[in-house]
Image (cartoon, grey):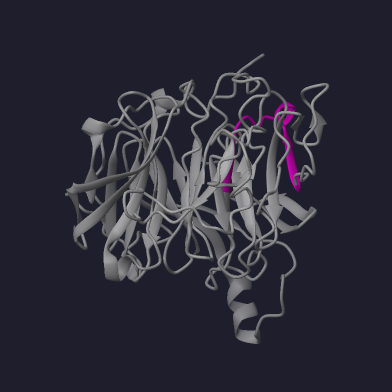
Amino acid sequence: MRLRLLWVSVLAFASVTAAAGCGSDRDADGFPAADTPSSTTARTSGAPASEPSVDDAAASASRRLVLRPVGRFTAPLFATGAPGDTKRLFVVEQAGRIRIVRGGRIQKTPFLDIRKLVKAGGEQGLLSVAFPPDYAKRGRFYVYYTDRQAKQRVVEYRRATAARANTSSARLVLRMDDPEANHNGGQLRFGPDGLMYIGTGDGGGAGDAHGARGNAQDLGSLLGKLLRIDPRASGSRPYRIPSSNPFVGREGARGEIYSYGLRNPWRFAFDRSTGALTIADVGQSEIEEVDHVAKGKGRGANFGWRPFEGNRRYKDGESARGAVAPVLELDHSDGYCSITGGYVVRDKTLPTSLRGDYVYGDLCEGHIRAAKLSPGGAVDDRQLPLKKVSTLASFGQDTLGRIYVVSLEGPVYRLTTG
């Protein structure tokens, strides 16, 4: 059975040095102008999702959807903003650095550099960063990385200044044993409830083979799950488990678990308008899937792996009680290999035809897609009229809701118009 590794086959294409800031032709945000040679452009199409104003409709009709370069990095994996800070974009590099883009330029000094602590390569490394809602006041933030012993860590740091973290402030929140080098999950995100959600892979290898039924269906394991915690320390405990978590108090179950039955939820997101949860779960041999539930309906949800890969039976003789079916499936026979989850578009500067749609892609296939999701289904799934992004590793979203596209080979783009 062929393994579906996120990065092993493509890491050699990643940039080996970080580039300086972009050129001098910049828009009001400091990013390169849309008509620079490195921009990727195409005309938008499709009916408006909602009725725009006359001026807005006319403007949208005359604009092109573009991928505007933000900069080049060394094997970037994620991009995000911090609450209360509209000036900085934080870009995560796999080797263990977080870089800042401000005024359209990559800052020389990293925000955080923990390369000496990180085991990077393949699917391992510094995989994401998350800033809590009170970041502007408290200065705490969290990273997810593979340590030198190949275990997964969630660690709290504090900022020293707006542009630099205090590396001596590290506090371990959670450390997870991991039997294989692949399927590490890696996404940290604060939800609409202010709690931190953690995506974990099933432990790696093929077929979720660790344990009698694998890890994803085992409520005694943190692997193959979406966890929910309050990451603040409480007495001698490094974090708190919300009493409203679905398996709190159940014998043999971990109270941290929020959802289960996941293979490798590399990227998930909450709709910043409705609070709906969307998980892009990397598939095994045939199917990549997108799971989508309304706000709060992910609590206790079983997304089906390993009895099911997408809607297809994967493991005969096993059940997945109450399994939630995916709303989208992508077949490997069509060139897909590792789904890259994105965001529901709420950026009002983008064409109305795209607002409210979920944008996503795939590491191998490379085209950016969009679909309108609802619990139980999806409509208007389509390829956006943009050129391919080679080794499409991640999407990102900043404090203003603007969406970014990340290539493992180095470039990071902003989805905009021009």
Residue 173: percent from left, percent from top: 36, 45
Task: Find residue 209 and report its image quarter.
Answer: top right
Q: Is residue 286 visible?
A: yes
Q: Quadrant of residue 29?
A: bottom left
Q: Name the one closer to the observer, 172 or 111.
A: 172
All told, the count of numbered labels is: 0
Residue drawn where x is 74% and y is 45% of the image: 328
Question: Relative to residue 99, is residue 242 depicted above or below?
Answer: below
Residue located at (30% from left, 33% from top): 95
The spot of residue 406 in percent (x, y) is 45, 45
Q: Residue furthest bottom?
A: 54
Q: In front: 123, or 170?
A: 170
Specify whether residue 259 is painted magenta: no
Q: Is residue 321 above or below residue 131?
A: above
Q: Residue 22: in sight, yes or no?
A: no
Q: Which residue occupies the foreground of this view, 234 or 85?
A: 234
Q: Is residue 246 left or right of residue 104?
A: right
| In this picture, residue 115 sits left or right of residue 187 | left
**Looking at the picture, how far across and down is residue 369, in whole percent?**
65, 49
Decide: is 325 above or below 190. above
Depth order, front residue of 387/244 = 244
Q: Residue at x 63, y 23 (%)?
A: 208
For the N terminus, give its image quadrant: top right
Query: Percent position (x, y) of residue 18?
Result: 26, 39
Q: Give the extent of the magenta segment.
A: 327-341
**Residue, x 56% and y 49% (percent of image)?**
268
Residue 340 is inside the magenta segment: yes
